[in-house]
Amino acid sequence: MSDSQPQQPSPFPPGGRGEGAGHGPQRPTGNGNAAAAESTTLLLAGARLTDGRTVDVRLGGGRIQAVGTAGSLPAPALSRVDLSGYLLLPAPAEPHAHGDTALTADGAGPVSYTPDEVQRRATEAALLQLGHGATAMRSHVRIGDVHGLGPLEAVLQARRSLRGLTDLTTVAVPRLLTGLAGADGLAMLRDAVKMGASVIGGCPDLDPDPTGFLEAVLDLAAEHGCPVDLHTDGDDPGRLARLAAMAGGLRPGVTIGPCGGLSRLPLDVAHRAADQLAAAGVRVTCLPQGDCAALERRGLRTAPVRLLRAAGVRVAAGSGALRDAGNPVGRGDPLEAAYLLASQGGLRAADAYASVSGAAREAMGLPEVRVEAGFPADLLAVRGDRISGVLSLAYSRIVIHCGRVVARTSAVREYCDSAVAVALDLPRQGRMEPGP
């Protein structure tokens, strides 16, 4: 079904989007929205699943309560969303964002890092990505230098203001952790964890002592029970081997990315590195849409996803830069990342989508989502009837987080009045009266 078929009725209730109605974006008000979501029952009617079935799905308490044949799960009128013509999927997640630098590419003069500006950017970026379907995101935030912990505190404040709309977690990213210059960075990293950064990151490639950097990060992560998410180009097989040897057994785990340098290594060397990462349980987050500004640009190539997957490495896909210096036209759209993995990376459409949904959630330590009873009600409805079509023309979307609709995008396509349009009976959306 193309995206130019008739629009479906809005899921928002008649008379507006009142507080507690449980339908559509609402102004966050702390825990009140979460409580409203927990008490709301919502019926998704006539949704198509990837196995071809058309079903009704009832949501309540932030989870999927039941999945039944179409028409078998009645619900009050105001709690019903008609998903006829939509494919219902587990929602994507964004495992590699940069909320502190997002949306800065077009600014005049130096980028402002005042707390208010960083919070505004991080909030806007998170909402943009939520509109694309990402109901959870992990934001890497630089700490240190002249800005200290200010950007981290601003992104943490954005996280609090977005509660109930999307789940935002932060990665503290110091620049140096070794030598005299690194002593301050290590102390600041400890403070960042105490402030609320839930993941420890950094760029060992940029430290004069990459191995010492890794040791410092892994020791601190083991001390606090934090996951690790590191930037690396992955073009040094010796460094990857050391990382795999040091990271093996660390819980709750180690993720690296974007690892585009692995694609520039000789094939046998890349295979050996992939085997080492798989044996150590190290995950990889690739960035098919471009890069991020955390690393020097050494040729924009995506990590060899098929090679890594064949070795048993768990691979997720993220967006990276969202209109900042790393990618001034970055979209932050997980479905575009999946599209690129399918069109250029050689993955099947279903595997490409899994890299931005199930694999991304796993990399972030989030519970699995399936369109089955008992699973979290974090879902994405996209106009279309199969994943390949959705990745090709994913315009109209309805985003569901914790059992309520939190974002909606509707695309309207019309064709001008012409003999060929009439002859072919082309589908139309929008108003039907003749245009000007």
Image: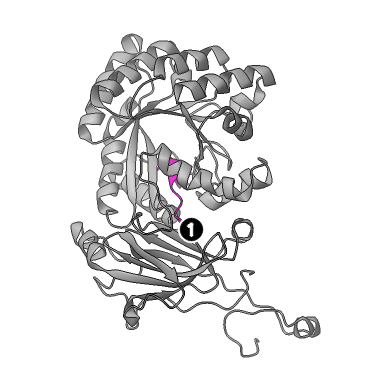
**The quarter of the displayed image where residue 196 is located:** top left
Q: In which quarter of the image is the C terminus?
A: bottom right
Q: In this view, does 329 lie above or below 384?
A: above
Locate residue 154 relative to residue 239 in the image: left or right.
Answer: left
Q: How many labels does the image show?
A: 1
Q: What residue type is labelled 1?
A: Leu
Q: Is residue 38 above or below residue 12?
A: above
Residue 334 percent coordinates (x, y):
51, 49
Residue 333 can be seen in this image: no
Going 25% across and 46% down the picture, which residue do you hit?
157
Residue furthest bottom in the image? 433
Q: What element carries label 1?
A: strand
Q: Quadrant of the N terminus?
A: bottom right
Query: What residue does disc 1 label?
Result: 89
Going 62% across and 43% down the picture, which residue do you hit?
341
Locate residue 22 relative to residue 94 in the image: left or right.
Answer: left
Locate residue 266 relative to residue 216 in the image: left or right.
Answer: right
Residue 119 percent coordinates (x, y):
31, 47
Locate residue 22 relative to residue 241 in the image: left or right.
Answer: left
Residue 174 can be seen in this image: yes
Going 28% across and 25% down the picture, which residue do you hit?
189
The residue stretch that appears in magenta: 89-102
Query: Which one is in front, 209 or 407?
Result: 407
Query: Which one is in front, 110 or 407?
Result: 407
